[in-house]
Image: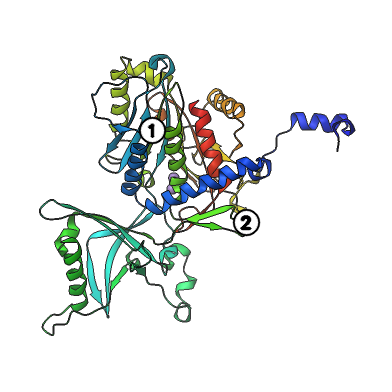
Amino acid sequence: MKETEKTEGQKKQEALSYKKKNYFETATDAERKEMFAYAEGYKAFLNAAKTEREACEYAVNAAKEKGFTEYKPGEALKAGDKKYFVNRGKSVVVFRVGKNNLEQDGLRIIVSHIDAPRVDIKQNPLYEDSGMCFLKTHYYGGIKKYQWTAIPLALHGTVVLKDGTAVQIRVGEEATDPVFYINDLLPHLGGEQMTKPAAKVVTGEQLNILVGGLPYPDKEVNEKIKLTVLDILHEKYGMCEEDFLSAELSAVPAFDARDVGFDRALIGAYGHDDRVCAYPALTAVLNANSNHTVLAMLVDKEEIGSEGTTGMQCKVYEDLMEDISDAMGANFRRVRAASKCLSSDVTAAYDPNFAEAFEKMNAAMLSCGTCMCKFTGARGKSGSNDASAEFVGEIRKAFDRDGVVWQTSELGKVDFGGGGTVAMFVAKLNIDTVDLGVPVISMHAPYELISKADLYSNYKAFLAFMK
Ligand code: MN
Ligand code: MN
């Protein structure tokens, strides 16, 4: 319809109403090409980085390639410096020092987490039973346990041997590698199992990972299969059974990231939560052209409450910000007060197959862009940062200025559940913070799903935030 044909009411409706836009639909051809090209880099990152250690290593290598150098706390800094700081090999902060006065302008911070739900190996894990050798596990993060059975798993991690040497293990990712497996019961005998609530269909102590079946050829040995496995571990990694005591091994899905759908609009992968925010945060800081001092903080332990020395609650991140302030001759309290943060974590995408869990008007819609959550938490916004209208307005203005397609949401219906992010830990430092991240289908499943449009929108949003 031509403009002249519109009625007064139609014009008014257009001017006054709000409607979410599908980013694929509104993007130019060139932009759509960029979306798909950007997704290729993201998939490569997903395949290379299935644990926080690997994500950290990836970020350091990517930063080095762009001329970033390692920051040593206490060293001098000047505008234009490009640095990265690694915390215990599990979290990393990549940052650029800008021209703006730090006390007046503060820092522009994007925080995402690089740990993901998975199944960790216990400290005394190895046993054999009935022709099979297993590793006992303890799951990490919020998982539906039954989803982790009967799928190919890879083992990733670090073993610190008796002599202190750290050995890296990564088995199950190459096409020629073996994979690992958690058994499930056949439906023929699963009658009783299938009557249980889903939380109890498979229990934590049943998540034992199958790692061997070949008996060691020696009649005098009992536990022959266990010995074969130990023999291989010793030959390959120099480890003995006792070395599991000081090991961090994780079973993660052995699937690669793949395009989903005939039109390749979507990506299926393990660990979108929260690498779909970490990758845009990293690439935005690597590619930023900003007068602000910008930081991408890729942190660990979010899935278990941001505790420990690599989680967001650790003082290490605050110390780093203070060191940067000191190096620039700025008072840290002033810097904090002027700083702004996007706490970038995923949110639940509306799923018509589970419509009852969502309130459609305030649910994140797939492909409608990265999603701002003014507040998170549970029940009456408990445990939430709840950003101010002023700060949301400021971010909104920056996004509109740069044509970012974005939306807002809450995680599901009121009182249906809820979730938290690192936002509240940053806000405690007197830093204005709001949550922004990509909508995910099947969050915390071994294979999660996102839209390429939302991934790219997240990247564009970060660039706008840092401009
Ligand atoms: Mn998350
Ligand atoms: Mn999560």
Horizontal relation, residue 210 to residue 152: left or right: left
How many angstroms separate mark 2 from mark 1 (CA)? 40 Å
Is residue 430 among the parts visible in the rendering? yes
Horizontal relation, residue 29 to residue 122: left or right: right
Question: 104 or 282: nearer the eye?
Answer: 282
**Furthest residue toward bottom:** 219
Instruction: Give percent across and percent down for residue 306.
Output: 35, 41
Instruction: Give percent across and percent down for residue 348.
Output: 54, 48
Disc 2 target residue: 263
Instruction: Give percent across and percent down for residue 48.
Output: 38, 52
Crowd tier of the residue under label 2, counting other residues whose Cα lies within 10 Å: few below 14, some 14–19, many 20 or above? few
Question: 249 or 373: nearer the eye?
Answer: 249
The image quadrant that residue 11 belongs to is top right
Instruction: Give percent across and percent down for residue 7.
Output: 88, 32
Crowd tier of the residue under label 1, counting other residues whose Cα lies within 10 Å: few below 14, some 14–19, many 20 or above? some
| 357 vs 428: above or below | below
The image quadrant that residue 313 belongs to is top left
Question: 393 or 74: nearer the eye?
Answer: 74
Question: 254 or 113: nearer the eye?
Answer: 254
| 397 vs 139: above or below | above
Is residue 348 among the parts visible in the rendering? no
| SS of the residue under disc 2 | loop
Horizontal relation, residue 224 to residue 437: left or right: left
- Image quadrant in which the N terminus is located: top right
**Residue type marked 1:** Phe
Disc 1 target residue: 425
**Residue type marked 2:** Asp
Instruction: Tell me the residue at 19%/61% (across/down).
Output: 237
Q: Which of marks 2 and 1 is nearer the N terminus?
A: 2
Rendered image: mark on residue 354: none
| SS of the residue under disc 1 | helix
Instruction: Tell me the residue at 33%/43% (across/down).
Output: 56
